[in-house]
Amino acid sequence: MEGRLGQNKRSVAEECVFDSLQTYEKRYAQLAHYLGAPERLLPPNELEFLRQIESRPRRYPGAIGSADARFLSALTSILRPPHAVEIGTLTGFSAALIAAAIARRYVTTNGLLVDTIDAREQCLIDETRPTGFEIAEIAPELAGIVRLHAPCDSQIIGQLAHREELRFVFIDANHCHPYPLLDLLRCAPYTRPEGWVVLHDIQLGISGRENSGAASTSPFGAEWLFEAWPFRKISGDNIGAVQLPVDRSRLIPFALRLMSLPFEVPGPGAARLRSALLKSLAGLV
Ligand SMILES: C[S@@+](CC[C@H](N)C(=O)[O-])C[C@H]1O[C@@H](n2cnc3c(N)ncnc32)[C@H](O)[C@@H]1O
């Protein structure tokens, strides 16, 4: 990616890695500072909830890991979005985390919602179970405030949120370039100016290369998007948050540059994606 995009267009990420529960409160304060809300303190029951989550008897593959879950939970808790959208549900683990963080911030959960979108009705890792099945296992009292949309993709975001409504979107679906870019561009009109988009697996491609060498097929979509992001961004290791600019049209030259990288999707799929990307750019003006 180096040569094709040019070093000078990128911004440097602030770092905030939630390496353990012991340092959670310290990292929380650091992240709150980065997010421009240093007055937001850790709610008393948040740490206990995370402790329970981390010691849950069963963990399903494919969900975000512990350090990334802490980052996601803290970011949601600090931003206090009354409504959040997630793309990529799988078992519903991250949706439950987001819902729990939102619910902790508000006295009543009436009307609060997490909209989570997945391409599959039946869960990718266990086809005998519906997508999102873990939400009721982790937090049955929150299942009512999480709304699952499956089979769907980011195209439906306009039916779930008003323009410039969202403070926060979580993207963790197809990681092949340019899917994460497409998901972000589709969400941008519905996200507030200076709102945040969290991207998961921003080190998936490089860690695949480190583990399996050049034969690795781990995709780089989220990684390239995060690396090339020219506005503010915060890295939490394999998860990162990027801040949208006030003027969304500034995303257009950035997106066009990123579209010059080879698509990790072969054949007619690539042509369809290119046309979906161009359509999504029109929504930014
Ligand atoms: C990595 S998993 C999500 C994990 C989940 N966020 C968690 O941490 O609990 C990716 C999910 O995205 C779904 N997916 C793949 N491509 C998608 C797309 N284009 N739009 C929406 N969902 C997609 C898959 O079916 C899968 O369930």
Image (cartoon, rainbow, N blue to C red):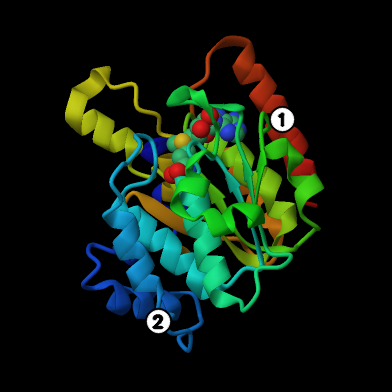
- Contact between labelled residues 1 and 2, with CB atoms less than 8 Å apart: no
Image location of residue 72, percent across then percent down: 43, 59
Disc on res. 52 = none
Q: Secondary structure at mark 1?
A: helix
View extreme (top): residue: 267
Report how far apart the C-alphas of labels 2 and 1 lie in the structure: 44 Å
Q: Secondary structure at mark 2?
A: loop
Horizontally, residue 281 falls left or right of residue 6, namely right
**Where does label 2 land, which residue?**
44
Query: Residue 97 or 198: which is nearer the viewer?
Result: 97
Q: Amino acid at mark 1?
A: Ala
The answer to which quarter of the image holds residue 55 is bottom left
Relative to 211, is 12 above or below? below
Relative to 266, is 31 above or below? below
Image location of residue 132, percent across then percent down: 54, 39
**Where does label 1 land, which residue?**
276
On the rendered image, what quadrant is the N terminus found in? top left
Ligand 1 neighbours mark 1 (CB distance < 8 Å): no
Instruction: Using a 10 Å C-alpha cutoff, classify the residue at mark 2 as few (fewer than 14 neighbours), some (14 to 19) or many (20 or more).
Output: few
The answer to which quarter of the image holds residue 154 is top right
Instruction: Let me know if residue 39 appears in the view.
Output: yes
Q: Residue at x 48, y 26 (%)?
A: 124
